[in-house]
Amino acid sequence: MRNRYLDLLRAAAIVRVIVYHLFGWPWLSILLPAMGIMFALAGSLTAGSLAKRDAGQVVFARLRRLLPPLWLLGLIAVPVMLIVGWRAETDGEHPFSVTRLLFWLLPIGDPPGSDQLIDWWEPLWYLRAYLWFVVLSPVMYAAYRRFGWAAVAAPLLVMGLLDLTDRSLPDTADAALWDFVTYGACWIAGFAHHDGRLARAKPWITYPLAAIMGAAALSWLRGHQGEDPWDLNDVAESQALWSLAFVLIVLRWQPTMGWLARLRPLDRAVTLLNNRAVTVYLWHNIAIAAVWPALTLVALDDLGGRRGELADLGLALLLTALAVLLFGWAEDLAARRSPRLWPTTTHRRAPAPDPPLPDPPLPDPHLPDPHLPDPPAADPPAAELEPAALTRAGAAPAPDGPGAGPVGLGARADGPGSGPVSPGSGADGPGSGPVGLGPGAGGPVVQGGPAQLARRRP
């Protein structure tokens, strides 16, 4: 069962990334620190997998779902960049190198690209950071289980040491290290969300601590402005503190989400964005780069103000949706699902077949077989038979008369000195024998047929 609150957070973060890359409004980085949220959610899901499966299987499964969509982008982007003159760029930020093309296959470093098409590859740092977090997750999860909240604070302490020592590494390693210390606390906070440690934390500790970190982040940002004022993406220290503070608040809260299912369009949009998160992230910047040429083509490039912004946003979303239709199937194949063009509903696996019923228990040899007919009832003693029963069996009632003896089963005549009724005759006479069943009397009465016992399945 998916957590729709987490799905809603991920969808909101993805939309915020698109809007930020389209308009560049710096206040969006403060309103919703999207990257910190996405890393925290990924950390929570990874912890859930590590708690149930072998670490190697978890890492392989995560990379298997991440890399094929990147490879599909590379199959298109790299030839296009070569066509537009990437080889001729000698003074670019990422000059063409055959060996560095390997980062398109396994992004342990940023996949390179042409300066002319920088929008095609610039956001790929996220996949590189994600890959390193996944690879290191078994170690980080073990440290978290041993040290708890100290493991969450560790990346921030490493960042402080880097600032104090002013040490730097080669460009590829330095970029990976700084992204790790910037968002590592959020990733490990996802572990705390998964195992419930964050939910169990005292609110009178969690919320004041988050407020202190948020205030420290804004204070540092004020004194270390980047290219765009008040943009957290330009200042790693402020980004790390603000993102962690935000994550501790939003992941500790778990509201009821029944209302989302009642808003069908929004519910379907959330599902779509979660099913195509990697595709949207990989292709949205390319869609944004195509907005202004497309508006020029239809003579709408001179729109200004709110109308122009709405046109830009609408076309960017439309082109991103087109990319989802064209390339989103790669995510389904990577996840070993049947491809779908527009997955606005949750993918349901086929139900497993019912387990076979157990064999019926063997019969107890000490009990009678319920499938055999009941044995015939034994004849009751003659003295216990009721007169009515004897009458039904064929015995004639004895006539009344003076000096009559006890009523017998046969025909009885009265007379002085008469003896018991002899068997079979039904007449009186000297020396007659005991009472018996005379001629015409029925045999033993059998009541009903064999009993049929129903067989009960265990």
Image (cartoon, rainbow, N blue to C red):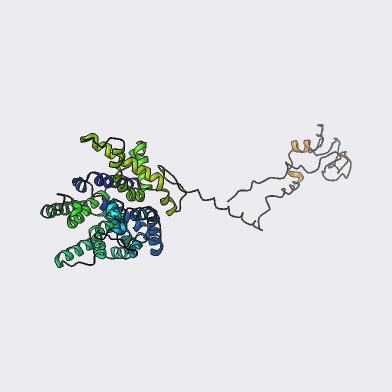
Left or right placement of residue 264 versus residue 302 in this view: right
Residue 157, quarter of picture: bottom left
Question: Quick check: 311 left or right of 78?
Answer: left
Taking 191 as reference, is 308 above or below it?
above
Q: Nearer the viewer, residue 14 or 425?
A: 14
Q: Position of residue 70 (x, y in %)?
A: 37, 55
Up/down of 227 relative to 439, above or below: below
- Residue 305 shows in the view: yes
Q: Quadrant of residue 418?
A: top right
Give the left or right position of residue 38, taking residue 436 as reference.
left
Q: How many marks?
A: 0
The residue lying toward the viewer, choosing from 357 and 142, is 142
Q: Where residue 182 sits in the image (x, y, percent)?
A: 22, 58
Query: Is 316 located above or below residue 153 in the figure?
Result: above
Q: Nearer the viewer, residue 79 or 321?
A: 79
Residue 148 is at least partly visible in this image: no
Between 127 and 347, the residue placed more toward the observer is 127
Residue 384 position, x and y percent, is: 73, 43
Residue at 35% from the left image edge and 41% from the top image edge: 269
Name the spot of residue 215 as percent of width and height, x first.
Answer: 14, 52
